Amino acid sequence: MSLSSFLSVVVEQIDIVEAPVEAAAHAVNPWVAFAYLVAGVCFIFALRGLSHPTTSRQGNRYGMIGMTIAVVTTLITHDLASLPEIIVAIVIGGGIGFIIARKIAMTDMPQLVAAFHSLVGLAAVLVGWAAYLNPGAFGILGEGGAISPVSRVEMGLGIAIGAITFSGSIIAFLKLAGKMSGAPIMLPGRHVINLGTLAAILGLTAYFTQDQSFWIIAVITVLAFIIGFLLIIPIGGADMPVVVSMLNSYSGWAAAAMGFTLHNTAMIITGALVGASGAILSYIMCKAMNRGFLSVIAGGFGSDAGGGGGGAAQTDRPWKRGSAEDAAFMMSQAEQVIIIPGYGMAVAQAQHVLREMTDLLKEKGVTVKFAIHPVAGRMPGHMNVLLAEANVPYDEVFELEDINGEFAQTDVAFIIGANDVVNPAAKTDKSSPIYGMPVFEVDKAKQVFFIKRSMGGVGYAGVDNDVFYMDQTMMLLADAKKMVEEINKALAD
């Protein structure tokens, strides 16, 4: 069988699964299916590459190649109302994306990702409504001039998932950007409200297959926007990385649902890949944080309404203040130092001077390792990206489960800008919003140096930290970058 014959068979099978399209009057080019297949393979390679820092750049390149193939194929093979307008829109959007990518700071990357997720969700909603208002243009008319029942299901689910993604991402953006409190906002009876709203959306979507009245699709849209807010509002700051991953999954499923409406194979494949990979990542992170995956989906994780947490730092408790010279001397005499970076390091842009500090310590014969918590920062992999930017060797970076057992044999635990991920309240205080989350056991280290700006602040979860007041802890109160620079100067002398 020739390649052309094989592709013709593939296209015939796709046509059986997909609803008839408006362009069905002319034969489908088998090379279109092949181009979309190549794009899908590129996206798979992209996900594979992004799974490890050493191959992440290549993964990004595969993703860009795949998207270029998909977009160009779609533009060439579809009858567009106005190709020049489409090209202008692509240029404008691409230009905005390029400028943002060049100017955005790594500390702002999590809220940028949340903002982009909201746009994907909004696009799905707009496509769904466009298909409802002009079904003939989308080729989804059935018998009697009504929208086919299958297309109504696709449309209803696509709009609902897209609206949830949009409104949920807006709340995530506001929390990550500090424009809204990171503390959980608990509504009375929120579980009943959430489940009732979700049941209403599913029920109306089922009813929509029998009656395509305007009010039904309008109510589905409004309820989905509302449930998006309700799902994310009760989630605390310590769980925000999981939220970003979860919203990424939602945006993928929204795109896949709209792919069915648009009869675009590449969009279905891409959306399914994003949705599935985001769901898997969310599950892995939930497992690492000892959270229930189903409770994440229901928006029920974070603290309970009665959770007291630790409140502000209790500065009336005795604590010790150290200096850059103290830290330099103790670390230079150590056999092993474990560095735990957090969001404070990102804010101070201290990753480069931190790498310089590790080089100075290694010259003195000290073994240096980095410990990365799954939720360190504001999005999955945030700390890994920052350390890679500073050219920290990958073999010196360890995940929590791989290094937590070494703190008992470690001379110095050096905490720079982290807080919640080293807070023992996660193991001891059932009222804490971070209770149950695995944390680094820095209390077992012989000496702890803790860099933070002041004793008055607490972590993103708003919980006081007993590590501040341990006998072996010295607080280094200063900007993280400035403090590390002083330590480097002392090490070099």
Image (spheres, grey):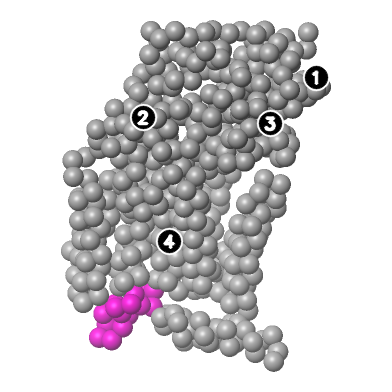
Mark 3 lies on residue: 369
Q: Look at discs 3 and 2 and give the one toward the viewer.
A: 2
Q: Give the residue type that dot 3 points to.
A: Lys
Mark 1 lies on residue: 364
Label 4 SS? helix
The answer for how far apart the CA atoms under marks 3 and 4 are is: 38 Å
| Category of crowding for the residue at label 3, using alpha-carbon neighbours closer than 10 angstroms: few (below 14), some (14–19), many (at least 20) | some
The answer for how far apart the CA atoms under marks 4 and 1 are is: 52 Å
- The answer to whether the residues at label 3 and label 1 have Cβ atoms under 8 Å apart is no
**Looking at the picture, how far across and down is residue 343, in whole percent?**
52, 29
Q: Residue at x 42, y 18 (%)?
A: 457
Label 1 SS? loop
Q: Give the residue type that dot 1 points to.
A: Lys
Q: Look at discs 4 and 2 and give the one toward the viewer.
A: 2
Residue 104 seen in render: no
Label 2 SS? loop
Q: Give the residue type that dot 2 points to.
A: Asp
- The numbered dot on residue 253 is 4
Q: Is 143 part of what is drawn in magenta?
A: yes
